[in-house]
Amino acid sequence: MYAVLALCWLLVFFDGLDVTVYGAVMPYMLDDTAFGLDAAAAGRIGSWTTFGMLIGALAAGTITDWIGRRTVLVWCVLLFSAGSGVCALAGDPLPFGAGRFLAGLGLGGLMPICLTVVAEFAPPRRMALATGVLMTAYHAGGMAATGLGLALAPDHGWRWPFAAGVLPAIIAVPLLLRHLPESPGVLYARGRFEQARLTAERYGLPAPSAADAPAAGASGRLRAVRDLVAPGRALATLLLWAASFCGLLLVYGISTWLPQLMRSAGYGLSTSVALLMVINAGGIVGMPVAGRVADRFGAVRVATCWFLLTAAGLALLATGPSLALTYAVVAFTGIWLFSASTMVYAVAGRFYPAADRAAGLGWVTGVGRLGAVVSPMLGGALVARGLGSGGFLVFALGGVLGAVTVLLVPVVAAARTRTDAGRAAGGEPGDAAGAGREPNSRAETTSPGRTR
């Protein structure tokens, strides 16, 4: 388990570095008059990145059961490393935007697969904690990106931090090919039963069975997607998508535009960029804390509270507090902001059964990327209109909506279960948890108690 978590942690570290580097160097790019980038174009390019991430997440979550976790991860790393190289060499905003879109394809596919791999190899009672530990890597990467921006961009130009984004292809790909095990469920689905058994035995996992194996072939991938919106599961899936949308609206909006929002509010350039490092430091602290608390009290409760605390922190920033208080509020907001989004994934990991987990997480993160697509344009519009600190109130509303949607997931699941129980007691057909299907059907939902 620990070796798998370490490999995935490294990948997500590079993910966080590549995503955050754009926000970290954006002030320097906007000041580079020869490059010709303005705030509106910067917002559009940020949205191209996240649109690529949306496509990458949906595609990877759908095909990973087909071609394997490790193969998809290798291609994701190669894609976002190539995109960073294109950005470093771009002569104007158009090829730069193409490079960010290419990087987005790889970045979008990487995250849901890493979440799926960690969920498959983690002990069930430590799934939320393992997810939280994994996501500390994202913020460690974000801090590294900010450090690169501060160290390189002022004296050497904004291109060098993007050039560093080529390193994952050199460092991570050989490690993946040599050390990352394939999912026992995927191996079982391919008919490699003995290898699946040995892999499960090596990592202390239950022996895989047909119920844990994703259905093979293109028809199996389509069935997995249909199962996400099957009767008894559709409304909860839509709520998870909405919660992920709100979470990623906040994550990518703040990660991309925090320095510029702080500059618009009257803070200096160095202070504004440094605050991006502070909020990511808060994310590193908050992830394992949220994971441990969620394993005890339930990921739904933690995600709901953390979304509301994020909204409160952003609303406080809109009041223009003193510099010392600003640093404290940004740090605590980082603790809640990034953990809230991550706990949505923990809720989804518990809600979907093993055979549907990769597709479920892929679509939760993929549809959630619509929030990431909207947020850079939203931030660009707020800065262009000179709203300054008042823009934080707009993002605070996303925190409130995130809290409401994630809180409703177990509510609608429990209501459906009670309805089905009543029908079964009255002898009515149509039990959404398995009427007309075998007991371990792929469409069978996880019990509501598991989505606490």
Image (spheres, rainbow, N blue to C red):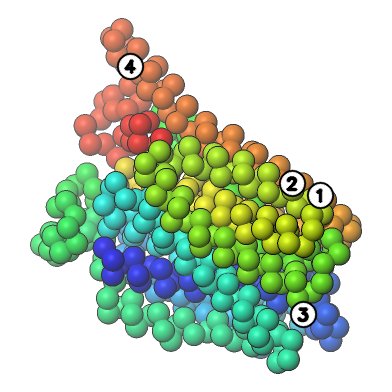
Tell me what residue is drawn at x 47 percent, y 27 percent: 411
Sequence-earlier tag: 2 or 4:
2
**Dividing the image into 4 quarters, which one contains the C terminus?**
top left
Q: Are marks 3 and 4 in contact (CB under 8 Å)?
A: no
Whole-percent x, y for residue 238 in the image: 52, 38
Seen as rendered, the residue at the extreme left is 194
For label 2, the residue is 315
Residue 319's disc is 1
- Residue 172: in sight, yes or no? yes
For label 3, the residue is 28
Count residues near mark 3 (Cα–Cα under 10 Å), then give few for <14, some for 14-19, many for 20+: some
Sequence-earlier tag: 2 or 3:
3
Q: Are marks 3 and 1 in contact (CB under 8 Å)?
A: no
Sequence-earlier tag: 3 or 1:
3
Q: Are marks 2 and 4 in contact (CB under 8 Å)?
A: no
Q: Nearer the viewer, mark 3 or mark 4?
A: 3
The Cα atoms of the two marked residues, 2 and 1, are separated by 7 Å
Residue 54: image quadrant is bottom right
Mark 1 lies on a secondary structure that is loop
Whole-percent x, y for residue 250 in the image: 64, 53
Mark 4 lies on a secondary structure that is helix
Whole-percent x, y for residue 443 in the image: 33, 36
The Cα atoms of the two marked residues, 2 and 3, are separated by 27 Å
Residue 421's disc is 4
Disc 2 residue type? Ala
